[in-house]
Amino acid sequence: MVQRVYRQIRSVDREATVTIATSKSQVSAINNQLGTGVNICVEPCRRDTFPAIALAAAYLHDVKGIPRKEPIVVCPVDPFVDKDYFAALKHLVNLAGQGRTNLALMGIEPTYPSEKYGYIIPVGQENVSRVSTFKEKPDAVTAAEYISRGALWNGGVFAFRLEYILDKAKKLTGFSNYQDLFDRYETLEKISFDYAVAEQEANIQVLRFSGEWKDLGTWNTLTEAMDESVVGKAMYNDKCQNLHIINELNVPVLCMGIQNAIVAASAEGILVSNKEQSSYIKPFVDRIDQQIMFAEKSWGSFQVVDVEEYSMTIKVTLNPGHGMNYHYHESRAEVWTILKGRGYAILDGIKHPVKDGDVLEMPIGCRHTIVAETELKIMEVQLGHEISVHDKIKV
């Protein structure tokens, strides 16, 4: 999704300055997919869209030197759209730059009274109208009443002058600059931009958009855009109807007699849900706190295979020409088994060529790294009374 949206923005405006606001765990994957030249504003932790936008605004002004009067547009990465959507974004930026209103929104022509979206009620029927009411995610009955009054779906797109959000964020959080906001980020209230800003703002314009637009932010809407009903190893019998299976595991999934459902299996967990109910998973996911089981890094990727009280087993893939940082651990030893490929390891300053079947042992305190000449697949076993991602001291 990030690759597609970034590519589409560039196709409409090659000179656009694009900054991605995301969590630290996503940075390596984004660099792999878009290159290391892309601007990334890293959120220290999850605090919903208002803190994220406020932090990105401070980053643009204090770190990147963007002037306060500069018009900015914020858009999500999960809409499935064509080029006309991004042409509309340029129009939205121009509206924000004129400074006649504090906030400019994109309104999507609704197709049914959904409870998943906010609703924008414009004053008139013009392509660009002032907004009389903005309401975030009403129930279905209220949504139907809004639509009867000409309401539009909130597309999650906001345009404003940078100074508007900087001033709003300083008023609501009391921060002094980007570094101050970053340092205090964990203490900020978890609140969406819609609730914190849009619902409170009286001076808003909306730009109507009636082109192709699908929100892929839920499993249900994602399946609507899938060409195939099955991704990965999966089977189902002829009693299944309207079923989609996404399986990222290396084990088969079998479904029998399941209807109107989604089955999604990955190293992070397994979801089995009625399609309609799948859009309500966020509060349940927010309660999950577990070991990261898969991650894409700048040098390759890793997948946790097994976790015990005093050990953890990880399958590591190193891309050709890449290597780990030279480092050591204070609380754990490691054993590496080379499953596939060629390269070399450095253990306490001594270089060792490695190939399929080689086994390397690193006791606690041993300085080590490994570099891939071809793609390297390694089974890494970590052993110790305290196994932590923080126990990595770079040399």
Image (cartoon, grey):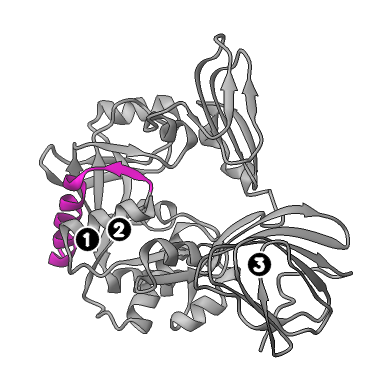
Determine the CA span between mark 3 and mark 2.
39 Å
Q: Is residue 96 magenta?
A: yes
Q: Which residue is mark 3?
A: 355
Residue 182 in percent (x, y) is at 51, 76
Secondary structure category for the residue under label 1: helix
For the residues labelled 1 and 3, the Cα–Cα distance comes to: 42 Å
CB under 8 Å between discs 1 and 2:
yes
Q: Is residue 57 above or below residue 238?
A: below
Q: Nearer the viewer, residue 287 or 173?
A: 287
At horizontal 37% and vertical 83% (from top left) the residue drawn is 63
Q: Which residue is tagged 2? A: 6
Query: Is residue 82 visible from the viewing direction of this image?
Result: yes
Q: Is residue 115 visible?
A: no
The residue at 64%/40% (across/down) is 250
Range shown magenta = 78-100
Q: Nearer the viewer, residue 151 or 328?
A: 328
On screen, residue 370 versus residue 89, left or right, reads right
User: Dot 2: within a 10 Å radius of its alpha carbon, few (fewer than 14), some, or many (20 or more) residues?
Assistant: some
